Amino acid sequence: MRYSQIFSKTSKTVSHDADSANAKLLIQGGFIHQEIAGVYTFLPLGLRTLRKIEQVIREEMEAFGGQEILMPALTPKSAWQTTDRWDGFDVLFKLEGAGSKEYALGATHEEIVTPLAKDYTFSYKDLPFAVFQIQNKFRNEPRAKSGLLRGREFLMKDLYSFHASESDLDAYYEKSKDVYLRIFERLGFDPKITVTTYASGGAFSQFSHEFQVLSEVGEDTVYMCEKCHLAINKEIIDAQSTCPSCGNADLLEKKGIEVGNIFKLGTRFSEPFGFKFTDEDGQMKPAQMGCYGIGPSRIMGSLVEVYHDDQGIVWPKSVAPLQVHLASLGKDEIVQATCDKLYQDLKDQGIEVLYDDRDRQVGAKLADADLIGIPLRVVVSKRTLESDSVEWKERSVSDAETIPLAGLIEKVKECFSG
Ligand code: ATP
Ligand code: MG
């Protein structure tokens, strides 16, 4: 990508609506644009990161047996009445269509997926299976805040699993915890700050589990057992005040951002929709269900919250919008020609390059590179070319090095391998 051709630019100023590091840096860096409170457009750079996050999640969901579908965002009132959630789900966006028909914008999709699964499930032989989607959700949050952390329209991956027995649901649910932890690690979170957390479970199990990224800006308070690397959400701490795994009572209070949530639904939704199947013994039984959510847009905001410095964002390699930030300094023809060639050579090797080919002051270009936060910066100037070299600087380290132009491509490939 040539930076001169991207329509969305970095900006020095940001509106005071930007109440958090992720809102400020993502808006200033030209990743997102705020439309109304809690509603954002993803700009070219921001969409690239969002898509990379989605792709990691998609790969892991497919490996976990999930079949990708896409359900509608417009959902009928009748389905929500069936489950008593038309009035019971406090943040549902409701709207009226032609002929005074009422609808809700999808805030979650049990009301759609349960009757859907019912249509294709007849006997125990059709179970188990799991479907997932990655889709915008709508919630009338009383206070949209903290940039991408709490939006009114946001992206969610929601997977739903269907089972013939509770024990089959239990086994799948347990496995999902490892899948989730792997996702967060692949997305670039240090495993030390991603904590599986016990939360209230509803009617069908004592606990649900949340995945919290420890951060001072998090809305949730959790009590953490350092030995087991598990936590309990404050909202249930009365029911369980010691580590559920080792009994340790010496728990540490921490702040966290909930980036994922898994839930055993049991028959909460299959019962009201009459979703029954014929079991091996010939009996009609309600299907057992689980749901497994992750917020890709909240994850994008969380990554910025935990990985930034005073100059800007420090993207993990796996989800950075592009890999190399190539900048030409000065107007010399040889500098331009060298950069143009390097840009092409890197692209030919499958490396993703943001080429800052603009005619700008050195300071402005370097400041933009820090703000945007691409993992590797390569700078070419008349001075570096005097020794047939370039300046190499990784965003996560403070010092730059001078390295020979010869062999540069190999070194870049090495930097992004594995
Ligand atoms: P919270 O407790 O933060 O309100 P929730 O428990 O209602 O979230 P779920 O219904 O479990 O959230 O949604 C699954 C995932 O979707 C969450 O773990 C989170 O990553 C994401 N998510 C939920 N609400 C929002 C929101 N308003 N903005 C951005 N992401 C969200
Ligand atoms: Mg929650």
Image (spheres, helix red, strand yellow):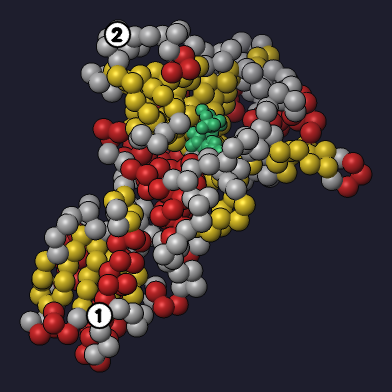
Quadrant (top left, top right, bottom left, bottom right) of the N terminus: bottom left
Q: For residue 232, which quarter of the picture? A: top left
Alpha-carbon neighbours of circle 1 within 10 Å: few (<14), some, or many (≥20)?
Answer: many
Give the farthest residue toward the front.
Answer: 16
Q: Is residue 265 visible?
A: yes
Q: Nearer the viewer, residue 215 or 198?
A: 215
Give the farthest residue toward the left.
Answer: 387
Q: Is residue 253 left or right of residue 335?
A: right
Q: Is mark 2 within 8 Å of ligand 2?
A: no
Give the farthest residue toward the bottom.
Answer: 333
Where is residue 137? Give x, y as percent: 61, 42
Where is residue 413? Give x, y as percent: 21, 64
For residue 1, above or below residue 276: below
Per the image, label 1 sits on a secondary structure element best described as loop
Per the image, label 2 sits on a secondary structure element best described as loop
Where is residue 78? Give x, y as percent: 80, 31
Q: Nearer the viewer, residue 309 or 338?
A: 309
Which callout, 1 or 2, points at the residue further toward the start of the chain?
2
- Label number found at residue 329: 1
Q: Is residue 117 visible?
A: no
Q: Residue at x 47, y 46 (%)?
A: 19
Q: Residue at x 37, y 39 (%)?
A: 183
For residue 11, above or below residue 192: below
Q: Identify the amino acid type marked 1.
A: Leu
Where is residue 311? Give x, y as percent: 30, 57
Q: Which residue is mark 2?
A: 249
